[in-house]
Amino acid sequence: MTTHAAIYARISQDNTGQEQGVKRQLDDCRAFAEGRDWEVLAEYSDNDISAFKAQSRPGYDNLMADVKARRVDVVIVFQTSRLWRDMEQLSSGVAAFNKAGVRLVESRGQEFDLSTATGFMNVGLAGLINSWESRIKSERVVAAAQQRAERGQPNGSVPFGWRREYTINDRGQRIGSRDLPDPVQAPIVAEVCHRLLAGESLRGVTEWLNESGVEAPGANFDLRHRGRGLTNPDGKAWGKTSTRKLALRAQNCGMRRYHKGAPDERLLPMNAEPIITRDEWERLTALLTAPERRTQKDGSRKHLLSYCRVGVCGVCGGPLRVANLTGRRGKPQPLYVCIDKGCVGRNRDYVDAFVREVVVGRLSMSDARDLLAVDDTEAKAAREEAAGYRARLDMAADQFAEGVIDAEQMARITARLRQKMTEANKRAQEASPGVPLELLDEVAGDQAAERWDALTVVQQQRLVNALFNRIAIMPTTRRGPGFDPSTVALEWRQ
């Protein structure tokens, strides 16, 4: 009677992508089957996929479908570690083999009859050893990563904006590394950060990157386990998410996050020259992680005072929106109206032109930069408070690593300190009502009018929010054509 076999091969890491490891395993298993005069019905493999981590293994899934359907009598592997590295998966896999009456054979080891107690014990012992080896390796990797982080050494691939410089000993071995700003990419990172700080939206900065022809990180990179989107098949285009991640990277200011999102997350000094200052990075972090950004769609703003902090109804104090009404000659007429009760309505174009005239006049004055610059005292104090909470988190992470506190205590400390750190960052953001220096430098001066017109609506809104406490649309009894500036009440911020 012919014995029908299936072969399975797997390798955890294949940096070359040439699948040489799985090919060697398949060749070995084929020779083994030929020596036993077994008929190989199917061959399955998973290249560059770990069996210890919770990763999808298409080849393994197809093999187990054959086993459960009893299409094969025996499964041949190089070693059982190619099948299972996780005890939970081992248990379910052995149960499926046993139920189907399928044997398991190592081409370089044992044969397991899983219907017997001895076979069950032996494969269990082999699986336990395989799992132990994986956990030992994982602990070594984690310890080495922590050591690199504490020494400030870079980790992983070279990020966009840097080039890596290695330290070589007299034997030609790499003993250290540091990241230096790349002469081409680093100015792009700095420009992205400064544009965002100057009030440009993520959408606007992303469009600038794509229009400038700057290729996104990972362009033409070969994704082994997933495909790219249809709209970005070569990975060259930037998206808002990739722009945001680029701006939020701690390495931009010469720092690195260790175990981001984990209870022992820490911000550590990195052996890398900064591209922006620590203060600029903290301001960017507060700006881009503000809770209100989750609901606001700054990139789509089209009107200066609609849904703006200072644009309000002069009757009820509610926010403004733009409504398009049909004029006397059938043309659409955009009006600022009260969003809640419709108390007031005023021609949007006339109001925007009036606000522009007032703002440009103020920005054209010689003392504009001195009077409108940010008073960062309160904001800086709030950022220092947030840094204090971050330092306490780092201390707690060290205590957790040394066994001084347990995981439950670490979770409670993390939850409380992160909440306080978030609140401090929010206060820092709110305490900076003045015009950002990056934006003020662009606008203030003799050419204020031209520079104002060149700004995006989001940047204009940010200036207006900084200059005024409120811009109220007041009710009017006047009828007929023309615009009455007195019906727009301007309250300057002191």
Image: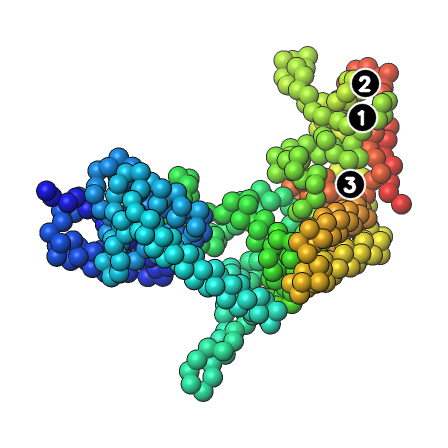
Percent x, y of residue 266: 66, 60
Quadrant of the frame with the N terminus: top left
Residue 347 shows in this picture: no
- Name the residue nearer the viewer: 317 or 455: 317
- Name the residue nearer the viewer: 190 or 424: 424
Q: Quarter of the image holding residue 494?
A: top right
Of badges 1 and 2, nearer the viewer stands: 1
Where is mark 2, residue-wise? Answer: 343
201 in relation to 28, above or below: above
Of the numbered discs in the image, which one, if any, rests on residue 465?
3
Q: Does residue 439 appear left or right of residue 188 in this picture? A: right
Whether the residues at callouts 3 and 1 have beta carbons within 8 Å, the answer is: no
Badge 3 density bin: few <14, some 14–19, many ≥20, Cα 10 Å:
many
Of badges 3 and 1, nearer the viewer stands: 1
Whether the residues at callouts 1 and 2 have beta carbons within 8 Å, the answer is: yes
- Residue at 50 percent of width and 51 percent of height: 212
* N-term-proximal mark, 1 vs 2: 1
Percent x, y of residue 186: 55, 63
Residue type at the position of mark 1: Gly
Distance from disc 3 to disc 1, alpha carbons, whole Å, reads 16 Å
- Name the residue nearer the viewer: 17 or 264: 264
* N-term-proximal mark, 3 vs 2: 2
Where is mark 1, residue-wise? Answer: 318
Distance from disc 1 to disc 2, alpha carbons, whole Å, reads 9 Å
Mark 1 secondary-structure assignment: loop
453 in relation to 191, above or below: above
Residue type at the position of mark 2: Cys
